[in-house]
Amino acid sequence: MSRTTRLYLNDILKAADKIARFVESLDAETFKTDELRSDGVLYNLMIIGKARSSAACAVAVD
């Protein structure tokens, strides 16, 4: 595994950890009305998607 792939995987882990922290102790209704937290979760999901796509490309090139 290349160093680049490891960095992408680390980005995924960091983003997943942030999502978990953002939503802990929230019920669904509170999450729906908390725009800041829902935007933070969406942003980190986008990071996960981009990192996953980039990691797959890095593995294909290796």
Image (spheres, rainbow, N blue to C red):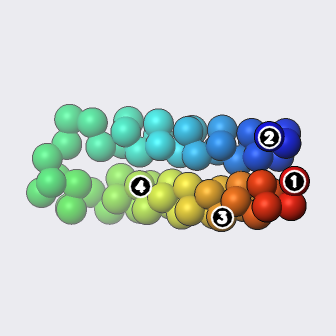
Residue at 56% across, 55% down: 48
Which residue has dot 1 on it?
62
Looking at the rendered image, the disc whose residue lies closer to the viewer, 3 or 1, is 1
Evaluate whether residue 28 shows in this view: yes
Lower position in the chain sequence, tag 3 or tag 1: 3
Residue at 34% across, 59% down: 38
Q: Circles 2 and 4: CB distance less than 8 Å?
A: no
Looking at the rendered image, the disc whose residue lies closer to the viewer, 2 or 3, is 2
Q: Circles 4 and 1: CB distance less than 8 Å?
A: no
Q: Which percent across, then down, holds residue 8?
A: 70, 47
* Residue type pointed to by label 3: Ser
Q: CA distance from mark 3 to mark 1?
A: 15 Å
* Residue type pointed to by label 4: Val
Which residue has dot 4 on it?
41
Which disc number belongs to residue 53? 3
Which residue has dot 2 on it?
1
Q: Locate residue 8 relative to residue 52 in the image: left or right.
A: right
SS category of the residue bearing label 3 = helix
Q: Circles 2 and 3: CB distance less than 8 Å?
A: no
Q: Which percent across, then down, holds residue 58?
A: 80, 57
